[in-house]
Amino acid sequence: MRKKDISSGISRRNFITLAGIATTIGLVPKKMQAAPMGSNNKLPEKLTGQTLFNDPLPENKIAEVLENKLICVEPGRFPGKGTVYGLDTNGHSVIKQNVIEPNRYLGWPTVLKTNTGRLMVVFSGDRDSHVCPYGKTQVITSDDNGKTWSKPSIINNTALDDRDAGIIQTKKGTLVQSWFTSLAFNDPARKGTYELYARIGEKIPEETKKQLLGNWVRRSEDGGETWLTPVRTTGTAPHGPIALKNGDLLYISTIQRGGKAVIIAERSTDDGRSWKVTGEIERPTGSEAGLSEPHAVELKSGKIIAMIRNEPKDRTQCFLLQSESLDGGKTWSQMKSTGIWGYPPHLKQLSNGWVLVVYGVRKEPFGERACISKDEGATWEYKDEITLCLADSQDLGYPSSTQLDDGSILTVYYQAPKFGEPTCIMSTHWKLK
């Protein structure tokens, strides 16, 4: 029997309210790898993954799960709880008994299949926990359709917490990676976290905080070997912008205005070098729900669908909201409920024209789910909801999908392999029947 999560969770909308003014961030080339792993739990050059969970999945009427596996884990490297310290003959601190910290916490990934067929997964890695100062934007790659994966390499490593990670490829072949930086670990209102990391926050100059805090995208023109100077976006969303057929980039994202979340549309007409807010999506009439973490997809017909995470006070009503644009993202319909319970969304149009949305479910039974629309989002077959993977707690989700050349689907997400363990990056390989 799966265990219930004993924590109340943390609203990620609170992180977004901390966004501020920023200018530049130091460059970190992709080829720079994470520091060596602890020798007691060393990763191989290629991670083949391990099959997860023996519990049988509920029957999926319209899909078949081929494999669930772990694709990235980062073992701890430094002394952790239980380590015994002492003094040498000179009075200097030394370790008498070394106990390596647990595996690192990984979260909020996005998967991309590039025009060369390479799979790339970006995420926030090398973390202590859900809130900490240490998050970095990392990437793993696979050149064999997800059978094996590289060790993680670093894209962004600022003095703040680098959170979320989106990635797309533009019409010109440029990679555009998105993320946001946070000072939530330095917020006195988060007493436990603040006390744990107060000295770290005190060491960061106020000017540096002002400079680095915000929402960002970063471009690579050489397939991710190097990354150019980051540029600011107004809003943020976990899976970042999308590439339109006309070459523009469209970013449906979240900002805070007057203490309330607003879903906006930003556009880049220069391959991601600069961004301009072009509009916003109207809330449902009378809604006071917390809205955040949207994603969009442009269909072959030209219609654009956006979905939004929806959190009203009545938690039984956390149904994804949907808005549509028929003019390339210039104007949008008012949000309406999809009837799909879960969050946040990631949308993908499949080769047969059907639209796929994947999302996490943080109520029992916890896990990753998918839903199909066969009519361009007019209706969703949520009665035939697809269960991709089960989980032991509600710290999970942020799935994203890509379709492989054989028509099967690879969905990537984060969750803990076992209750009480740090979260890792995992994948489900599956196909529609």
Image (cartoon, helix red, strand yellow):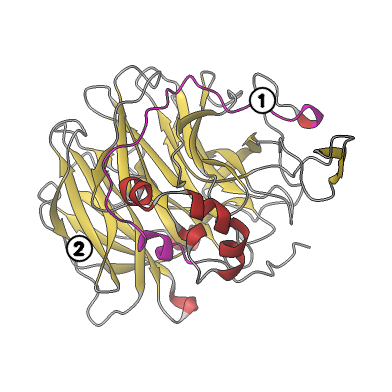
- In the shown orientation, is residue 392 left or right of residue 307? right
Disc 2 + disc 1, Cβ < 8 Å = no
Element under disc 1:
loop
The residues colored magenta run 11-40
Is residue 432 covered in magenta? no
**Circle 2 residues within 10 Å: few <14, some 14–19, many ≥20:** many
Residue placed at 68% from the left, 31% from the top?
Answer: 49
The answer to which image quadrant residue 285 occupies is bottom left
Residue placed at 29% from the left, 59% from the top?
Answer: 254
Q: Which residue is mark 2?
A: 281
Residue 89 location in percent, x, y?
Answer: 90, 35
The answer to which image quadrant residue 217 occupies is top left
Residue 201 location in percent, x, y?
Answer: 50, 54
How far is mark 2 from mark 1, CA to CA? 45 Å
Amino acid carrying label 2: it is: Ile
Q: Nearer the viewer, mark 2 or mark 1?
A: 1
Q: Which residue is mark 1?
A: 36
Instruction: For the N terminus, give its image quadrant.
Output: bottom right
